Image (cartoon, rainbow, N blue to C red):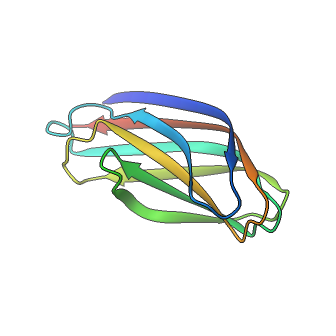
Amino acid sequence: MRGASARATAVSIVNATETTALSGIPAAGNSSTIIDQVISGVVNITAGTGTTAVVVKCKNAAATQVGTSQTHTLAAAAVANIPFCFTDSSGVNNTSYTITLTQTGGTGSGTANEIVAYSSGEG
């Protein structure tokens, strides 16, 4: 098993706009030798005004979404730790991944206080 990690702090999530919270998450290794890339982590978030949920997405180096969107209910001004996990079984040699966040119903900016992600692969 191989792995790599990335971290970011104090990322502003503008209203209900999809926002890149963490980019450049390195792939765990060459996809030609790794069957699946697993990208997992947690984001500590303070929701903005009007927010009812937070949507987490993972995108590969080609900006193609990996897996399905993960929606977490979260009230406005609430603080929460939101875990996420995505599996890239595409077999495409992706060099990095990006995590995006969107506030559902957000009329005021929220903050990703800290986000950490880890990619792992076995093959």
Residue at 39% in and 42% down: 97
Residue at 53% in and 40% down: 22
* In the image, residue 75 above or below residue 43: below
| Whole-percent x, y for residue 106 in the image | 73, 66
Q: Which of the 4 image quadrants contains residue 93?
A: top left
| Whole-percent x, y for residue 112 in the image | 69, 44
Residue at 30% in and 30% down: 1
Q: Nearer the viewer, residue 79 or 85?
A: 79
| Whole-percent x, y for residue 37 in the image | 31, 43
Side of 94 where 70 appears, left or right: right
**What quarter of the picture does the C terminus occupy?**
top left
Side of 11 where 120 appears, left or right: left
How many marks do you count on the picture?
Answer: 0
| Whole-percent x, y for residue 69 in the image | 49, 64
Q: Which of the 4 image quadrants contains residue 12?
A: top right
Q: Which of the 4 image quadrants contains residue 116?
A: top right
Side of 76 where 27 appears, left or right: left
* In the image, residue 47 above or below residue 96: below
Residue at 30% in and 37% down: 121
